[in-house]
Amino acid sequence: MAVIQTAEQAVGNIKGGMAVMIGGFLGVGAPLKMIDELASANVNDLTLIGVVGSYPGGGLDIGKLSANKQIKKFIGSHIGTDPEFVKQYNTGELEVEFNPMGTWVERIRAGGAGLGAVVTPTGLGTEAEEGRDKLVVDGKEYLVYPPLKANVAIIKGYRADKVGNIEYRGTSLNSNPVMATAADLVIAEVDEIVEIGQIPYNHVGTPGILVDIIVQGNSFEDRKKYFEELWTKNNKLR
């Protein structure tokens, strides 16, 4: 059964050198409170598995971790939206394993399902095939990728009940549900914690059996206001 902890307590489960998955895309559908707490902790040499390296609005998401140089390796699709990531990559301080976005999420799905590999033609004839094993099936060539798993997954949901069933909303569906299947420890940050039975069974995106820790994040209304202020301040809203 999942337990309810503060963000500070939950981050105590993350140690230096671990592989950590963090859900979300450019800050949206991301566990921002947990990221802030992790950025304040003395936890370094992380292997971060996230869809993109990002520092949207110049002030949130996993860019706080890159600014602190807490990440030694990044496994994702691109880093161009985070200037600090790009700088560290160019100077050799950061190791990056680039994946086509669909391949990246399928590797996590394979990790959660206990599969041995992802076999895909995507990337053939490009730099993506460098160092990759290849497989020929029915005369067609494929690249072979190992599955992705992590010590800890930090996911973001809309609501959780007190046994850890998670309901998602909007962009949080992008990578959070699949990450919940592919880590030894799953920490779910949510807008709201409700009583058992308040989330209709057909709205449960991740069952509580997969969730170890629930963290109360900011409310949906507070998050909406935060993003509006952030993007307005940076002239991103017209």
Image (cartoon, rainbow, N blue to C red):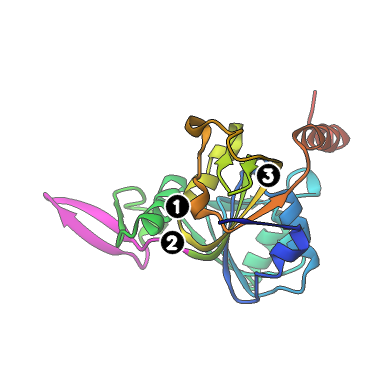
Mark-to-mark CA distance, 3 and 1: 24 Å
Q: Residue at x 66, y 59 (%)?
A: 86
Of the residues shown, which amino acid type is indicated by label 2?
A: Leu
Q: Position of residue 161 (x, y in %)?
A: 62, 43
Q: Which residue is mark 1?
A: 104
List x then y, in percent, for residue 184: 50, 65
**Is residue 226 in view?**
yes
Categorize mark 2 by other alpha carbons within 10 Å: few (<14), some (14-19), many (20+): many
Residue occupying image coordinates x 21% and y 59%: 135
> Which quadrant of the figure has residue 165?
top right
Q: Earlier in the sequence, mark 2 or mark 3?
A: 2
Q: Residue placed at 76% from the left, 58% from the top?
A: 6
User: Where is the C terminus found, in terms of image quarters?
Assistant: top right
What secondary structure is found at the residue carrying circle 2?
Answer: loop
Name the one closer to the observer, 184 or 134.
Answer: 184
Q: Which residues are magenta?
A: 130-149
Q: CA distance from mark 2 to mark 3?
A: 24 Å
Category of crowding for the residue at label 1, using alpha-carbon neighbours closer than 10 angstroms: few (below 14), some (14–19), many (at least 20): many
Q: Is residue 4 left or right of residue 203?
A: right
Residue tagged 3: 190
